[in-house]
Amino acid sequence: MPTKWDVSRIKCSANSTITNQAWFRRLNPKFREFVLKRHCRYFPMLLNHPEKCSGDVDVLVVVKSVIEEHDRREAVRQTWGKEQEIQGLKIKTLFLLGTPATGKDERNLQALVQYEDRTYGDILQWDFMDTFFNLTLKEVNFLRWFNIYCSEVPFIFKGDDDVFVHTKNLIELIGFRVEENKVENLIVGDTILEAKPIRNRQSKYFIPKELYDKRYPPYLGGGGFLMSSQVARRLFVVSESVELYPIDDVFLGMCLQKLHIVPELHLGFRTFGIIKRKVTRLNREPCFFRNLIVVHKLIPRELLHMWNLVQNEELICARHVVL
């Protein structure tokens, strides 16, 4: 394992051996691009913070974001992503970015994110475009980065920039798992079982049978999950032998399957909303948020408002909220 990020050039050419296959020609251009460069795995870093894990760090909060979502990152920094110490555990935060997608104001956006990083020092950025199909690149590049720079940090919380996280409840969950001596294989969140690939071409999650023809292994909803460093280190090793897949959550499930680890389902992680897949006022009830760990999804204004409500000691809730 290298002692620093050693990828300085993009060494990647398209795999032209599949371009004549009928199923490939039916794919949309972005999907074709993914398939052609599926073997391209690691990329140069544009922004790096190897110092982030120096000293005593107990929990690394890692947030997937894209350059133009500055408001979301600001809201996270002011709420659940705030670097602090809770119940004796020191928390550090990083945001994972690629580069602006084609057609956006690339130069100005890049200048803005560099200024943002000079201000906060909490952005990791790689030289690949931030697109849906490149989310898996964010996964594998982060796993490699963690193993180089942060492998001794005991716990990682990985989440999206549009979720609510009750940080204190997350820390309490870590404490429970440590007490129970259930850390070695710890990876916990909103586990999805027996899912099938979507064959509807209109869906952004469409997968042709030629690419994958089985049920998915158990995987975690990517809105937010917790894992131990032991799992992260093993995930990195096994991920290098798993072919990249266009859905990052499923890719991680494939890696876990090779490790014979089934991700733990915890009802405190609601990556599809509090009341699953329904629009209801209960999805904005602060007493529910106070009793959960992760809730998806909130815009920045909603996140700031809900955070203030939940932190308010005058909020009176039943001792146990049943959902």
Image (tube, rainbow, N blue to C red):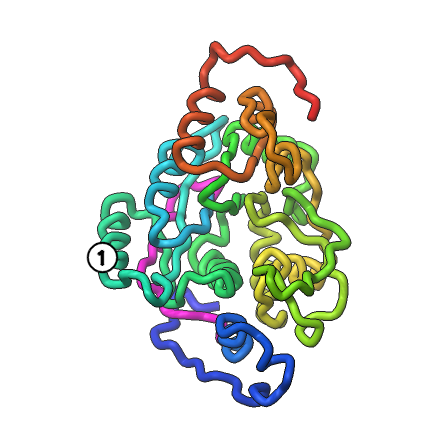
Q: Does the magenta segment cover residue 191? A: no
Above or below 206: residue 294: above
Q: Does the magenta segment cover residue 44? A: yes
Left or right position of 63 against 233:
left
- What residue is rendered at 55% in x and 45% in y? 223
- What residue is rendered at 74% in x and 70% in y? 213
User: What residue range appears in magenta?
Assistant: 40-60
- What residue is rendered at 31% in x and 61% in y? 104
Closer-to-camera residue (150/27): 27
SS of the residue at dot 1? helix
Q: Amino acid at mark 1?
A: Ala
Above or below 286: residue 209: below
Quarter of image, res 71: top left
What residue is disc 1 on? Answer: 111
Left or right position of 48 against 176:
left
Count up the numbered dots: 1
- Image coordinates for residue 51, horizontal then vertical, percent: 34, 51
- Image coordinates for residue 196, horizontal then vertical, percent: 73, 59
Closer-to-camera residue (1/125): 125
- Image coordinates for residue 234, horizontal then vertical, percent: 61, 59
Quarter in which the C terminus is drawn: top right
